[in-house]
Image (cartoon, coloured by chain):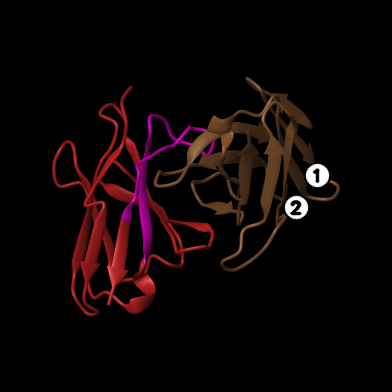
Amino acid sequence: GESVGLHLPTLSVQEGDNSIINCAYSNSASDYFIWYKQESGKGPQFIIDIRSNMDKRQGQRVTVLLNKTVKHLSLQIAATQPGDSAVYFCAENLDYGQNFVFGPGTRLSVLP
Amino acid sequence: EPEVTQTPSHQVTQMGQEVILRCVPISNHLYFYWYRQILGQKVEFLVSFYNNEISEKSEIFDDQFSVERPDGSNFTLKIRSTKLEDSAMYFCASSGTRGASSEQYFGPGTRLTVT
């Protein structure tokens, strides 16, 4: 989900369930994407990345899917744990440099 | 585990004053970055820095902003004459290698409040 302004979309999941967080990116020329996790009071933390020549990449408990046709990125978290509660946002890279464009974020809330 | 540190955690300043935000990157990293995040909004890239010069900067990073590596461990962001709209979280990051795919490690941020 997406939003602008002060209200982040929130995804609430039961502990142990899988989570899917979505991101629509802006530029069809973007060729590199990162998912970040941001816990309250902390800076963004790298989770997983993917290049545009891939459709899917897996990490530990996380999978990123890239659909270039519709400019859509998703983050799947398996067996969601309380420690996964955070804001998650995607970032796209437009020009092989350092200038990433960040998405607005989704708040993941894990219910006991 | 090495981490990026930032000081202060919260800075309150009056409009028109100069502020310096400080960061200590991870010790063997060579590439440094500043980002800002206005409350409730997206993280925005400000500037990247390598070999004592700016590598890239965004449109936000105007003449009011400057960065410096005054010694072997600190990396600073200076805002010369703060405006109300400069109120935000400012994050420093560092990476060991160059390129978009080099993992950037972020500090905890400095909350700047301009009154």
State whether residue B100 is above or below residue B21: above
Residues at badges 2 and 1 in contact (C-beta under 8 Å)?
yes
Of all chains in the rendering, the one displayed in brown is: A
Judged from the image, the secondary structure of the residue bearing numbered disc 2 is: loop
Residue at 21% x, 77% y: name it.
B14
Magenta region, residue range: B88-110
**Residue B65 in the image, given as x and y percentages of width and height:** 29, 65
Local packing at callout 2 (Cα closer than 10 Å; few below 14, some 14-19, many 20+) is few
> Residues under labels 2 and 1: Cα distance?
7 Å
Report whether residue A52 is seen: no
Q: Quadrant of the C terminus of chain B?
A: bottom left
Residue type for callout 1: Lys
Mark 2 / mark 1, whichever is N-terminal? 2
Identify the residue position indicated by label 1 in the image.
A68
What secondary structure is marked by label 1? loop
The residue marked by circle 1 belongs to what chain? Answer: A
Coordinates of residue A65 in the picture (x, y in percent): 76, 35
On the same chain: label 2 and label 1? yes
Which residue is painted at 32% across and 58% down in the image? B111
Verify whether residue A64 appears in magenta: no
